[in-house]
Image (cartoon, rainbow, N blue to C red):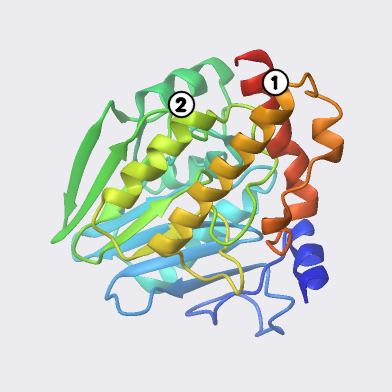
Amino acid sequence: MRRTLLALFALGITAAAPAWSQGQPTAPATKPPPFETTKVDGTDNVYIFRYGNHQAMFVVTKDGVIATDPIGYGRPQAVTTYVDEIRKVTDRPIKYLIYSHHHYDHIAGSQPFKDAGARIIAHKRAKDRLARLKDPATPLPDETLEKKRTLKLGGTTLELIYLGLNHSDSTLVMRLPKEKIIFAVDFLPVGSVPGRGMIDFYPLETEDSIKQVLAMDWERLIPGHPGAPGGRLGTKKDAQDQLTFLQDASEAVKVEAREGKCWEPAEKEMKLPKYENWPNYQTALPFVLRRYCGLWGRGT
């Protein structure tokens, strides 16, 4: 079973929950359809749109829709599909699109949302970075924030919270206080080892961010990639498990680094057997070790 999960994860495939609305026929659990839209159990208006191995949250209110992350990097059809999937749920206008952070695999290709009338909101650092890249398919935010903003639309409240450096320097956590749901992308994977996007990952600051998330009032976490196993949502235990994993990796690499073993042989030889059954372990562990070698071996 572990080998099967690792293989599927490496291909960008995860088992997913049954679709609320989708554009493809039902497929076996081990081979989900290319995309699907799922209503979050126990809510009236919270949905998850998944395309491939990326997912975003959108919220339908009586006055319009709040959407997040267009997930269109290298696949513009994902963004138009996302808009079409929202239209299957409601004909109310798409009022807002929130960028979780500036990384293109989550926010590229958002022009169809702009064309639909959405105002784009992001952290101010995301706007600064996107302004330098000048991608015509990815509009700059219309509005930015530095620490926190509370968005209210049609009786729904969504908090946008900047916790500081973590997986990027522009990540927003989005919290629905009534529903006790958060949307947190990339720095809090659910049930798996973090992926290879460790280039601008800030290790010690990420620990602080996770501690702040654990102190918040929430019960379920929608991650930016489907949770393991089965595309599940996360819990506070998952957040604590991820924090513990990072702390364990950090301490183990620190010992090796102080013996002069970074980058090699630490990166090639180190193992964390406590986590060997986690999906993505074999593929992603070297990237985790490399980043911590950067911290403890170079001070960066």
Considering only vertical position in the picture, is 178 above or below 130? below
Q: Quadrant of the C terminus?
A: top right
Judged from the image, the secondary structure of the residue bearing numbered disc 2 is loop
Callout 2 amino acid:
Asp
Considering only vertical position in the picture, is 247 above or below 177? above
Q: On the picture, is 208 further left or further right than 31?
A: left
Considering only vertical position in the picture, is 5 above or below 197? below
Picture coordinates of residue 92, whole percent (x, y) = 28, 63
Asked where in the image residue 218 lies, by quadrant, the reply is bottom left
The residue labelled by disc 1 is 258
Q: Is residue 253 visible?
A: yes
State how far apart marks 2 and 1 are (Cα).
28 Å
Q: Nearer the viewer, mark 2 or mark 1?
A: 1
Picture coordinates of residue 49, whole percent (x, y) = 50, 63
Q: On the picture, is 81 further left or further right than 210?
A: right
Q: Is residue 95 visible?
A: no
Q: Quadrant of the N terminus?
A: bottom right
Callout 1 amino acid:
Arg
Counting residues from the start of the chain, the first of labels 2 and 1 encountered is 2
Task: Pick the residue in front: 75 or 211.
Answer: 211
Q: Residue at x 62, y 58 (%)?
A: 192
Picture coordinates of residue 271, whole percent (x, y) = 77, 47
Q: Residue at x 68, y 32 (%)?
A: 253
Marks 2 and 1 close (CB-CB < 8 Å): no
Asked where in the image residue 106 lies, by quadrant, the reply is top right
Q: Residue at x 70, y 26 (%)?
A: 293
| Label 1: few (<14), some (14–19) or many (≥20) C-alpha neighbours in 10 Å | few
Judged from the image, the secondary structure of the residue bearing numbered disc 1 is loop
Q: On the picture, is 177 further left or further right than 259?
A: left
The residue labelled by disc 2 is 169
Picture coordinates of residue 172, whole percent (x, y) = 37, 39
